């Protein structure tokens, strides 16, 4: 099958899935799995390996944890107390 025909079919399928109200991430994932099953049937075990390797990426683990840590510090009130204390300690220091 010609690559341009496959591209057109996948693009139209993506548009149809998104028009049904399915989120973009799920539409892309579903089309990716269907594409692997159709064009590379022996690659089905690769789906699990790809998901595991992506999930073990340092950035995908560290960034959400830093955001979570910032939210915990913000809503616990520690950040306001910390900035008040630092302001009182270093008020007299110019610059």
Image: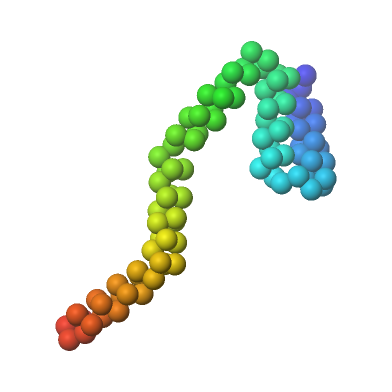
User: Given the current orientation, which residue lies at the most extreme bottom position?
Assistant: 92
Q: Position of residue 33 (x, y in %)?
A: 68, 27
Q: Is residue 87 visible?
A: yes
Q: Position of residue 39 (x, y in %)?
A: 70, 19
Residue at x 57% of width, y 21% of height:
46
91 w.r.t. 37: above or below:
below
Could you say where residue 89 lies in the image, as x and y percent from the top left? 19, 80
Q: Is residue 5 left or right of residue 29?
A: right
Task: Describe residue 32's horizontal placement relative to residue 73 as left or right.
Answer: right
Q: Is residue 93 left or right of residue 22?
A: left
**Quadrant of the image occupied by residue 58:** top left
- Residue 82 % position (x, y): 29, 72
Q: Residue at x 56, y 24 (%)?
A: 48
Say above or below: 22 vs 42. below
- Name the image quarter holding residue 71: bottom left
**Foreground residue among 49 and 5:** 49
């Amino acid at each position: 099958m010609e690559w341009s025909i496959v591209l057109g079919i996948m693009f139209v399928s993506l548009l149809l899935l998104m028009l049904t109200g399915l989120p973009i991430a799920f539409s892309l994932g579903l089309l990716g799995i269907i594409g692997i099953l159709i064009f590379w049937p022996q690659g089905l075990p690769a789906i699990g390996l790809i998901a595991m390797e992506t999930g073990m990426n340092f950035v995908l683990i560290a960034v959400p944890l830093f955001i979570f840590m910032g939210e915990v510090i913000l809503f616990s009130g520690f950040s306001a107390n910390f900035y008040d204390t630092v302001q009182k300690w270093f008020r007299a220091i110019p610059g």
